[in-house]
Image (spheres, coloured by chain):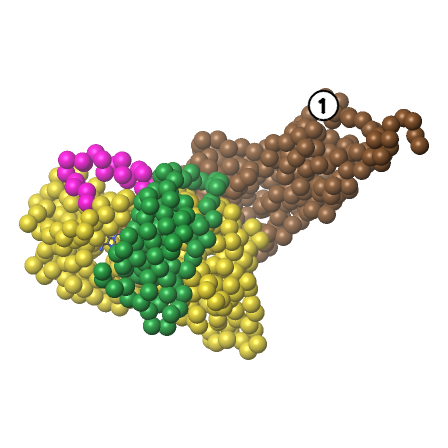
Amino acid sequence: MRIEEHPILSFDKGRRVDFIFDGKTYEGYEGEPIAAALHAAGIMVLGHSHNKQRPRGFYCAIGNCSSCLMVVNGQPNVRVCTEKLQENMIVETQVGKGDLR
Amino acid sequence: MLEKTGVATEQDLAKAIPTKERLAKGPVAIIECFQRIPCNPCYTSCKRGAIKEFEDINDTPEINFEICNGCGVCVSNCPGLAIVVVDESYSNEEALVKIPYEFLPLPVEGSFVTGLDREGKPVCRAKVMKVLNTKAMDRTPLITLAVPKELSMTVRFMKHHDIYSDNTFICRCEELTLGELRELIRKGYNTIDEIRRISRAGMGPCQGRTCRQLIMQELAAATGKKMSEMPISTFRPPVKPIKLGTIAGGERGE
Amino acid sequence: MRTTEIAIIGGGPAGLCAAISAASLGAKVTLIDRNDNLGGQLIKQTHMFFGSQKQYASIRGIDIAGILMKDLDKYQDKIELMLDATVIGMYEDGVIALEQNEKYIKIKPQSVIVATGASEKFLTFPNNDLPGIYGAGAVQTLANVHGVAPGKNVVMVGAGNIGLIVSYQLMQAGINIKAIIDASPKIGGYLVHASKIRRMGIPILTSHTVKYAHGKDRLEKVTLCRLDEKWQQVPDSEFDIETDVLCISVGLSPLTELLWQQGCEMKYVPELGGHVPVRNENLETSMKGIFVAGDVAGVEEASSAMVEGRLAGLCAAKALGYIAADFEEQKNDCLDQLNSLRSGHVGEKIRSGLAQVTV
Ligand SMILES: Cc1cc2nc3c(=O)[nH]c(=O)nc-3n(C[C@H](O)[C@H](O)[C@H](O)COP(=O)(O)OP(=O)(O)OC[C@H]3O[C@@H](n4cnc5c(N)ncnc54)[C@H](O)[C@@H]3O)c2cc1C
Ligand code: SF4
Ligand code: SF4
Ligand code: FES
Ligand code: FES
């Protein structure tokens, strides 16, 4: 959900771009964190923990806690709370510890 | 108790409320700030010098009610939003309460809202007398509410829709409530025709006979126009609901 | 290897003020932040700040960041900015290692001001890892920086200033706050903040805690319970609240890794948020030439972080021979401001904490 009106802030967004999450196309704004774009699209589960397979969302949103690791353009272990969205990015949930390809 | 609930008690408030005589004279600031915190913009923003100089930045504000003229400058400068202006000289029945309101949508002047107490409980219907939102206020607009006089020290916030409006039907046919109507007016639907088109109110089986007048009254109250000056809705035949067949069958009548 | 006179790690209010004060005396400064923007916590603070005019009271945090940035611009020729640059190590020979654009960069400064701020504490209860359970800072970043709502309904854990302010800000963004709870019997944040939230009809439940979070793929419901005077659960006091977001705001702990690496003497001081560096009046740590300022030196407020930054900048510059003509006067002004900010009822904790680590 995007915040449409705000009494104090106005949000200057980048360009609207498409990106792909687990095979499906979504829209987001260029330059915003991938996690924000996913969240705005209603996706809160970013992955599953590697031992107990528990669902994982973000926690700190500033790159401290590593709760939000995903595979981005084939590269595993990307912190999507700080990684910026670009056009046609391919974002995937990470299975396990993320094999380094 | 304030420490536990966040709601000031009568004891706390006793220090903040001026005498009846002073209240009767006109607008005055009520500062509900009872804890020593490092903060002093109320003092620095009051150009009249009504607030005693802080010796230590942690002092709680001490106001001289005789110097304060209720100008309201301190209200939008207080980071704690702890100040309101109360004017009991407004009328015999009503007092004005000026509150800071940093939310959207802003209420519309002339419309009615619900007055809330310090716990957010609805306590009265309040008319919005003024909405001030200047650059100097830096996104902390001031809303002036007219409230029943005995609630001048009770009402401290507002919410949209008054407490009576949500189950109050204006258009029985199309089930439009007073609350919904006010929301439409707030959104800028300012003539009866616009309201009819967007909500279907007035287009039910009674053809608006039950609701037209009520909608216009509400519009008049919100926009400040006189009933006599308002555009009336376009009347289209038939003026009374008839079976479709009646028209289709023509004049011959079988 | 790159060199500089003063490296400042962290571009929040503390780091910004340190950079401005050191550069204004003529020192060459390198200001490093891992974000692509300066301002630290300020960039999400939409509310008016406390303090006095000297600490920009009554101005919104977001705008204070703008004011500091303008001041910084005046010393462009003295200040080198490194953004999107994360300091990953600080070695005993004084070399700083950082990563910027996937490049590994080393810098050798003559002195360092560490102003890395603090990170959020976590809370333990079953299923505390479900998506939908977020740190308050995270929710604030999402809503106020990126314009995305964390969810529809929020239960806030923690009635300190951060919990209260973030709740208010979420309401401003149109998000419903179901309740604010706190294990303590008293509201920890400023009471004026608490009162303004209560007026909106939001309950503040003191002596309450989270017992359990429920949900399959994401948070759906929380079980809360009441605590007695000994912070023990009152039997049969559990109740459920449906919510899609639980926001945790139970305090911050200083981000001190770099100081540990340097071998600075550290001390555990709960009043200041955890382990903090031992420092002298000039904010210099036990390691010569390593200064600290802001939340990393003890979790406090932006108002004090700015003054500490200015003081650290002043003293670090002096150590390198850039001495302000009115150094003593400026230093005393900083110390006076800090004293007065901390002299109130709420500053009591900070005062007792600082007494343990200031030598
Ligand atoms: C919700 C909320 C409300 C608040 N309200 C108020 C208020 O009303 N008044 C008030 O005075 N204070 C308030 N504060 C507190 C205030 O924001 C902080 O005390 C202040 O920001 C601390 O400043 P700082 O510079 O020490 O740290 P920060 O602002 O946290 O800045 C630290 C910076 O260092 C960077 N950094 C950290 N590690 C590294 C690294 N390894 N490499 C590179 N960069 C790094 C970070 O990215 C960050 O930009 C509030 C805080 C919050 C969360
Ligand atoms: S209302 Fe005006 S005169 Fe009264 S204390 Fe506030 S600023 Fe001063
Ligand atoms: S400005 Fe507001 S919060 Fe600050 S001391 Fe004055 S009344 Fe209290
Ligand atoms: S959410 Fe903490 S690192 Fe991304
Ligand atoms: S929470 Fe334990 S390492 Fe991240």
Does the magenta segment cover residue C79?
Answer: yes
Which chain does the numbered disc 1 sit on?
Answer: B
User: B233 or C193: which is nearer to us?
Assistant: B233
Q: Secondary structure at mark 1?
A: loop
Q: Give residue C266's position: percent from left, percent from top.
A: 21, 66
The range drawn in magenta is C64-82
| Chain B colour as displayed | brown
What residue do we see at 67% from left, 42% from top? Answer: B179
Question: For the view shown, which residue lies furthest in the right direction?
Answer: B254
Q: Is residue C260 above or below residue C55?
A: below
Task: In this rendered view, identify the residue nearer to me: C49 or C107.
Answer: C107
In the shown orientation, is residue C195 left or right of residue A12? right
Q: Position of residue B64 (x, y in %)?
A: 51, 40
Q: Residues within 10 Å of mark 1 (few under 14, many from 20)?
A: few
Q: Is residue B202 visible?
A: yes
Can you give x and y, in whole percent of width and height, for residue C304 in the image?
Answer: 30, 50
Quadrant showing the C terminus of chain C? bottom left
Q: Colour of chain C?
A: yellow
**Quick check: is C352 in the magenta stretch?**
no
Of the chain colours in the picture, the one used for chain A is green
Question: In this image, C100 relative to C53: left or right?
Answer: left
